[in-house]
């Protein structure tokens, strides 16, 4: 059975960054539900039209939309040997539907890596986050600035701030996370799947802990 790893944690915990490191090490694709939704918004698809208002406000898109997008992604043949997913599931309802989906597709949910950090660190990280509109590389003005202001080191593309990375929207996203996503910690811990990781350390140290926790 192919293994699935979920990266969970508050916005700004670095779950996307860790997923991007973990997937190539395991030789499987990385799926980011946030990235898929932002792409849908950019391409003005039907899902994108529904999702836009939620993303801008820092709220979760309806569960059915999230599960449909996740299902479409994980049923692609690139995922047949397993995958790493971040940003999904984010509610209990999504977790229950995800378990069913994994069962149907004969995947094994190996571990849920829960990356934990405080609101103060989140605010510092996210207000300084800039992403490349060309290749998706992520920088931070304070901790990992680009060599040339506003320009991606990797591909030379323009760097942008995400619409939902303003202090006001970050606080909404954090509250949404506390209310809707933290029940998952208990759910996965009861199922024996949860591994808690301290996300306040530097990226490479967190990745060492992630790798150790899953024995790779
Ligand atoms: P992220 O890139 O993971 O920070 O997600 C950005 C935004 O996408 C969130 O604030 C939500 O609006 C939406 N989103 C991402 N994943 C989910 C999900 N599993 N369920 C509902 N909405 C989601």
Image (cartoon, rainbow, N blue to C red):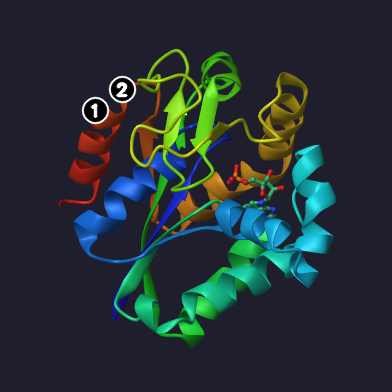
Left or right: 82 in relation to 118: left
Q: Position of residue 91 (x, y in %)?
A: 67, 54
- Please tell me which residue is depicted at 22% across the width and 64% down the height of the picture: 27
Left or right: 138 in relation to 88: left
Identify the element where label 1 is drawn. helix
Q: Cβ of disc 2 within 8 Å of ligand 1?
A: no
Q: Which corner quadrant of the image does residue 203 belong to?
A: top left
Total residue callouts: 2
Q: Position of residue 51 (x, y in %)?
A: 78, 57
- Please tell me which residue is depicted at 20% across the width and 55% down the height of the picture: 25
Where is 97 relative to 191, above or below?
Answer: below
The quarter of the rendered structure image containing the N terminus is bottom left
- Please tell me which residue is depicted at 52% across the width and 35% down the height of the picture: 158
The answer to which of 117 and 152 lies nearer the viewer is 152
Identify the element where label 2 is drawn. loop
The answer to which of 160 and 47 lies nearer the viewer is 160
> Mark 1 and mark 2 in contact (Cβ < 8 Å)?
yes
Q: Is residue 49 visible?
A: yes
- Please tell me which residue is depicted at 54% across the width and 47% down the height of the picture: 186
Q: Position of residue 113 (x, y in %)?
A: 39, 46
The answer to which of 172 and 161 lies nearer the viewer is 161
Alpha carbon of mark 2 to alpha carbon of mark 1: how far? Answer: 5 Å
Which numbered dot is residue 78? none
How packed mark 2 is, by other alpha carbons closer than 10 Å (few <14, some 14-19, many 20 or more), is few
Where is 97 relative to 206, above or below?
Answer: below
Q: Is residue 88 visible?
A: no
Q: Which corner quadrant of the image does residue 120 belong to?
A: top right
Residue holding disc 1: 205
Residue holding disc 2: 202
Q: Position of residue 215 (x, y in %)?
A: 16, 51
């Amino acid at each position: 059975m192919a293994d699935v790893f979920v990266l969970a944690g508050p916005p700004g915990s670095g779950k996307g960054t860790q997923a991007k490191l973990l997937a190539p090490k395991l030789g499987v694709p990385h799926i980011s539900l946030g990235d898929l939704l932002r792409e849908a918004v950019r391409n003005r698809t039907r899902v994108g039209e529904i999702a836009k208002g939620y993303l801008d406000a820092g709220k979760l898109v309806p569960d059915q939309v999230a599960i449909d997008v996740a299902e479409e992604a994980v049923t692609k043949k690139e995922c047949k040997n397993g995958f790493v997913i971040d940003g999904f599931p984010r509610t209990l309802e999504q977790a229950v539907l995800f378990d069913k989906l994994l069962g149907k597709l004969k995947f094994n949910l190996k571990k849920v890596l829960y990356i934990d950090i405080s609101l103060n660190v989140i605010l510092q990280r996210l207000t300084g986050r800039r992403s490349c509109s060309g290749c998706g590389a992520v920088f931070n003005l304070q901790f990992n600035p680009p060599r040339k202001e506003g320009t991606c080191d990797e591909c030379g593309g323009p760097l942008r701030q995400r619409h939902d990375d303003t202090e006001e929207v970050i606080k909404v996203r954090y509250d949404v996370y506390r209310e809707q996503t933290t029940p998952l910690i208990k759910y996965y811990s009861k199922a024996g799947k949860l591994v808690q990781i301290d996300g306040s350390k530097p990226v490479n140290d967190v990745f060492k802990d992630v790798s150790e926790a899953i024995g790779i």
